[in-house]
């Protein structure tokens, strides 16, 4: 009897307490930021929740980028999508092609009468997520771009400066080896940095139709250009001589830099925290090397990271809150706080100006390198970003090709030919299922 | 089992008569099978014939295109051969190793419990955890194992050398499976009738001779069981291990069937291809299961 009374009281308490919570509209925000980055996301969300009393954003970490996107897709198919989901750069074309699954951010802001314009954002960050008319379909959130980290002590011992061109990179590597280093340089995210960013930074088109920006149909890869073949050949030769050491996908090669095996390391600017935490030696940040033989290089780098998508098929009364939260994230102080805490590039001009005014870039010149690369020159039509379906598979194909060339199993020419053949087949398939002209 | 009773005849002590009760009692299990097995399988069967976008907004019937594409692709053939070689090699090595260790440990006069405990440890680890341990041990320039190999003159870089990556995956899998096989062989050895072993000893069979002619044949049912469970483990449960160790690389050198399925379904959102591959995998495991039942019925006296 007593047990029943207690249980009944508990039930009553839950029932009565529920409306008190429901007074605020709850906005589900699914993201892929774990560890320190997840803590920072939570700070942003708490800041928003404390700033008003009508909406409550609930941030949920859904694993890594792949898993988060998958979770959102599965939830959408089940009819219970989150309000906002963070989707990484390579998922952009998939999200864009799924018309009806998302609500374009520019349309949401217009509908909710909140000030919003593409030119509030840093051009390189905006162009990756804008449609053909320059309207933002998703909100740029965490933006990064590759930079060259270098070990100041090892470079000084060899008497070399951070290389600005790939030719200098080869020469610097040779001198580093002569000075006793085990390896000149390594790279994280090989397919992203040595193919996608290599193309943009040297002003080379990656795929036809302005990298898929114009249309999803009839797009084919342009990776058989001489500059790509030469770069692949250089990497293979350097891999044999020890100037370059391949360390695997993602940031698996990072320990090679941390334990001073390799004197230089290319990785995302957002690896700054990991390197600052691990390196027990003086280090610096320089721009990526460019291919000196390509006229006009360096051009601009493209943004990596992720953007926030607003899902459709959510209750209409959630939309004002979703819009208010996105608007909050765009504000200059929030952008500055986020960039300072994470090493990501601020995505709005206001955020950049706030960091500049506070003297942040004077104290942390390394953090400025990524911003300078992104805005080195106004983007060309084919250096705004990539808008290609099956991009994860395309990356996989390129990594396989790179690994085959480095292992001496294929010539650069044959490997690139295979990349284009396999990639074009995928792009054709994507063109068949994706929506028409945009 | 007394299967000879007429239907409806009550067993002694049975309270209920009627046809609904068995179904009611079966219901929870049927629901579980229906929701978690039948429904997804039918769904995969259907998806294998459709091409659609990730969000399920549009799709079209494409007939056997996914089947033709999958079966005709060089990558799938490569993954199939790789998986077979991997499964056969790891099963053989870990069976032989587990058997040898079990015979050695059970033959000890003292310290058996200690060795049993030690050899069982790897089995207690989830594949992903043991893979993480091996990653630390064999990360170039950092790991202890990698250091030893470098010292021995091996240019160790599994991120690039296909053979080294395959060896790493193989070693980790065998290490993990060994404990399981050791456990079952150990238990089987303990349950062997002592009279047979004594008779063999009286006949003068000792050492290797006794192991080969008496113990090994007596353990055939255990071996058969282990072959099938090992194969199933290697086919399906090594996903986490490969994901942590090599992610299928370099250049697809460690991309097994189940890892390729994961890549296509969850990284590439290629539902049709993934559905076809899961059906093919299901077919494979069904064949294995049927084979096991057949062989067991023939070999093992009931």
Image (cartoon, rainbow, N blue to C red):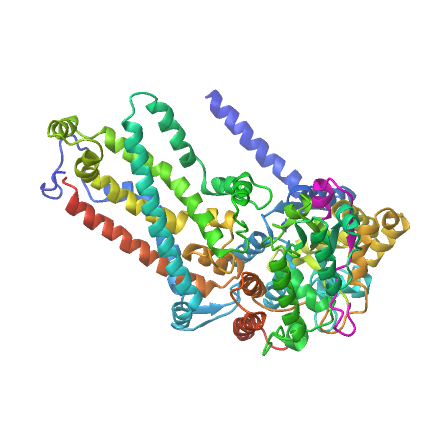
Q: Position of residue B82 (x, y in %)?
A: 40, 58
Q: Quadrant of the C terminus of chain A?
A: bottom right
Up the image or down, A377 lies above or below A36; here it is below
Task: Give A221 or B48, whichever is nearer the viewer.
Answer: A221
In the displayed structure, does residue A125 sit left or right of residue B280?
Answer: right
Residue drawn at (16%, 42%) of the image: B300
The residue sitting at the front extreme is: A178
In the displayed structure, does residue B131 sit left or right of residue A253?
Answer: left
Q: Which quarter of the picture shows residue B225?
A: top left
Residue drawn at (59%, 31%) of the image: A13
Task: Give B21 or B116, whichever is nearer the viewer.
Answer: B116
Q: In the rendered image, is residue A320 in sight?
A: yes
Up the image or down, A99 lies above or below A27; here it is below
Residue drawn at (49%, 58%) of the image: B263
In the displayed structure, does residue B270 sit left or right of residue B84?
Answer: right
Q: Quadrant of the N terminus of chain A?
A: top left
Up the image or down, A133 lies above or below B162; here it is below
Q: Which residues are magenta?
A: A272-298
Q: Is residue A24 magenta?
A: no
Up the image or down, B63 lies above or below A79; here it is below
Task: Give B273 or A11, whichever is nearer the viewer.
Answer: B273
Q: Is residue A297 magenta?
A: yes
Q: Position of residue B101 (x, y in %)?
A: 32, 34
Q: Which quarter of the picture shows residue B24?
A: top left
Q: Position of residue B204 (x, y in %)?
A: 13, 30
In the displayed structure, does residue B21 sit left or right of residue A71?
Answer: left
Q: Position of residue A192 (x, y in %)?
A: 64, 61
**How many numbered marks appear?**
0
Q: In the rendered image, is residue A121 in sight?
A: no
């Amino acid at each position: 009897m007593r047990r029943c009374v207690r249980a009944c009281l508990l039930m009553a308490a839950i029932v009565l307490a529920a409306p008190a919570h429901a007074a605020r509209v709850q906005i589900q925000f699914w993201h892929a930021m774990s560890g320190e980055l997840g803590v920072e996301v939570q700070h942003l969300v708490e800041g928003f929740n404390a700033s008003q009393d009508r909406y409550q954003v609930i941030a949920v970490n859904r694993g890594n980028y792949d898993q988060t996107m998958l979770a959102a897709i599965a939830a959408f198919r089940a009819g219970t999508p989150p309000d906002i989901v963070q989707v990484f750069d390579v998922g952009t074309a998939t999200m864009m092609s799924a018309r009806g699954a998302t609500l374009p951010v520019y349309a949401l802001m217009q509908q909710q009468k909140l000030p919003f314009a593409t030119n509030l954002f840093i051009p390189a960050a905006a162009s990756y997520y804008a449609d053909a008319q320059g309207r933002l379909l998703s909100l740029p959130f965490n933006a990064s771009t590759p930079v060259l980290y270098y070990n100041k002590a090892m470079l000084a011992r060899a008497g070399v400066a951070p290389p600005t061109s790939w030719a200098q990179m080869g020469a610097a590597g040779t001198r580093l080896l002569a000075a006793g280093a085990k390896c000149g340089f390594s790279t994280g995210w090989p397919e992203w940095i040595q193919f996608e960013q290599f193309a943009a930074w040297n002003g080379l088109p990656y795929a036809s139709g302005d990298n898929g920006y114009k249309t999803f149909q009839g797009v084919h890869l342009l990776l058989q250009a001489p500059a790509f073949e030469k770069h692949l050949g250089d990497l293979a030769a350097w891999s044999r001589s020890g100037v370059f050491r391949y360390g695997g996908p993602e940031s698996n090669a990072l320990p090679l830099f941390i334990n001073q095996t390799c004197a230089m390391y290319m990785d995302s600017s957002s690896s700054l925290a990991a390197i600052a935490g691990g390196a027990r030696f003086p280090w610096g940040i320089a721009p990526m090397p460019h291919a000196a033989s390509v006229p006009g290089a360096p051009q601009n780098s493209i943004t990596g990271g992720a953007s926030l998508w607003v899902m459709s098929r959510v209750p209409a009364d959630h939309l004002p809150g979703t819009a208010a939260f996105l608007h909050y994230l765009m504000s200059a102080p929030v952008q500055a706080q986020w960039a300072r805490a994470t090493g990501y590039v601020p995505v709005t001009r206001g955020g950049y100006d706030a960091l500049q005014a506070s003297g942040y870039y004077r104290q942390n010149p390394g953090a400025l390198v990524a911003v300078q690369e992104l805005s080195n020159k106004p983007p060309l039509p084919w250096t705004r970003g990539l808008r290609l379906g099956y991009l994860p598979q395309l990356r996989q194909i390129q990594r396989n090709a790179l690994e085959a060339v480095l292992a001496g199993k294929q010539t650069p020419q044959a490997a690139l030919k295979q990349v284009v053949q396999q990639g074009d087949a995928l792009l054709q398939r994507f063109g068949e299922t994706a929506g028409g002209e945009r | 089992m007394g299967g000879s009773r007429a239907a409806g005849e009550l067993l002694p002590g049975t309270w209920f008569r009627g046809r609904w009760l068995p179904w009611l009692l079966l219901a929870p299990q049927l629901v579980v099978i229906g929701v978690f097995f039948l429904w997804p399988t039918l769904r995969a069967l259907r998806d294998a014939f459709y091409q659609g976008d990730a969000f399920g907004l549009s799709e079209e019937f494409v007939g056997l295109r996914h089947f033709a594409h999958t079966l005709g692709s060089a990558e799938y053939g490569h993954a199939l051969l790789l998986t077979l070689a991997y499964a056969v090699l790891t099963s053989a090595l870990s069976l032989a190793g587990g058997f040898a260790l079990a015979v050695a440990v059970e033959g000890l006069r003292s310290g058996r419990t200690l060795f049993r405990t030690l050899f069982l440890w790897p089995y207690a680890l989830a594949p992903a955890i043991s893979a993480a341990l091996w990653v630390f041990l064999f990360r170039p320039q950092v790991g202890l194992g990698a250091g030893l190999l470098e010292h021995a003159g091996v240019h160790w870089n599994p991120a690039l050398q296909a053979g080294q990556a395959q060896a790493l995956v193989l070693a980790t899998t065998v290490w993990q499976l060994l404990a399981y096989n050791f456990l079952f062989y150990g238990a089987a050895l303990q349950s062997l009738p002592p009279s047979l072993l004594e008779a063999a000893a009286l006949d003068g069979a000792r050492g290797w001779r006794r192991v080969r002619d008496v113990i090994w044949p007596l353990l055939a049912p255990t071996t058969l069981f282990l072959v099938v469970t090992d194969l199933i483990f290697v086919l399906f449960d090594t996903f986490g291990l490969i994901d942590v160790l090599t992610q299928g690389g370099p250049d697809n050198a460690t991309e097994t069937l189940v890892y390729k399925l994961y890549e296509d379904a969850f990284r590439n959102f290629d539902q049709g291809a993934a559905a076809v591959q899961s059906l093919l995998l299901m077919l494979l495991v069904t064949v294995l299961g049927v084979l096991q039942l057949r062989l067991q019925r023939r070999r093992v006296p009931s």
